[in-house]
Image (cartoon, rainbow, N blue to C red):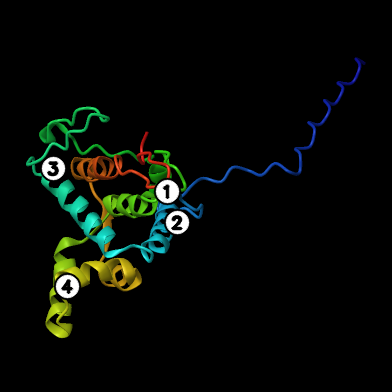
Amino acid sequence: AGEAASTPPAPPAAPTTVQPHQPVDQDQPSTEEEDTGQAGIDQVDGDADAEAVHLSTDDVTLLRNVCLLGEEAASGRNVLACEHLDDAPNPDKIKDCFSAIVGDPFHVIHRPKTPINHEANKVYFVGFRDALLQFNPVLLNQVKNAIKEKHGKSDDAIDADIYFDAAFWKECVDRRILPPRLLYWRVRAVFVSFGFLIDSTSKKPLFN
């Protein structure tokens, strides 16, 4: 009789730490925390509110004028020329292209480096926040008009109140980050308006 066939060895056991792959159900929401950039928005917002309580009435007037300057530029009435900035593009040439990967406002604001002790640094920071986050203009006007009618406040007093009682206004009026064709001009207005401000001690501008 021939030799009996040998039994092949059993395969090695799979490691106990390896888990079988589970198919992903596309209809179920992901349990992983997504980075929406909200943490960056909240941090910038809180920092700016802390700085805003120290603003003067002149600072508030400057901030409002910067916002108006950005609106004028977006409408094509002012190109915001500045020798330290590249020439502004034609407003019609700015396309609203969006990306799934963006920098949050906290990192955007801290990219330009400014002297920590410069006396214009606080109002610049608040102005930059305002450029990035715009109140809903329709709802904002409705709330302003209601306050005028009920409390008889002036426009200047209400504008100041937006900075000195920020929590109330953010609770009443939603904000958003604007599309690029509008956002560009608001940010440029901040650079043009604050970049040349001279510190009374160092005698240097905010941007060198």
Question: Going 44% across and 42% down the picture, which residue do you hit?
Answer: 115
Q: Provide the secondary structure element on which disc 2 rests.
A: helix
Mark found first going from the N terminus, 2 or 4: 2
Q: Provide the secondary structure element on which disc 3 rests.
A: helix
Given the image, on which type of amino acid does mark 1 rest? Phe
Q: Classify the position of the C terminus by image quarter.
A: top left
Neighbour tally class for label 4: few under 14, some 14-19, many 20 plus, Cα within 10 Å: some
Neighbour tally class for label 1: few under 14, some 14-19, many 20 plus, Cα within 10 Å: some
As drawn, is 45 to the left or to the right of 150?
right
On the image, the x and y values in percent for residue 192 come to 24, 40
Pick out the residue farthest to the bottom.
150
Kindly tell me whether residue 83 is visible in this rendering: yes
Mark found first going from the N terminus, 3 or 4: 3
As drawn, is 25 to the left or to the right of 199?
right
Q: What's the distance in space between the residues labelled 3 and 1, CA to CA?
A: 25 Å
Kindly tell me whether residue 28 is visible in this rendering: no
Mark found first going from the N terminus, 3 or 2: 2
Q: What's the distance in space between the residues labelled 3 and 2, CA to CA?
A: 28 Å
Q: Which residue is mark 3?
A: 73
Mark found first going from the N terminus, 1 or 4: 1
Q: What's the distance in space between the residues labelled 1 and 4, CA to CA?
A: 29 Å
Q: Which residue is mark 4?
A: 144
Q: Which residue is mark 2?
A: 43
Q: Provide the secondary structure element on which disc 4 rests.
A: helix
Given the image, on which type of amino acid does mark 3 rest? Ala
Given the image, on which type of amino acid does mark 4 rest? Lys
Q: Which residue is mark 1?
A: 106
| Among the 4 quarters of the image, the one containing residue 73 | top left
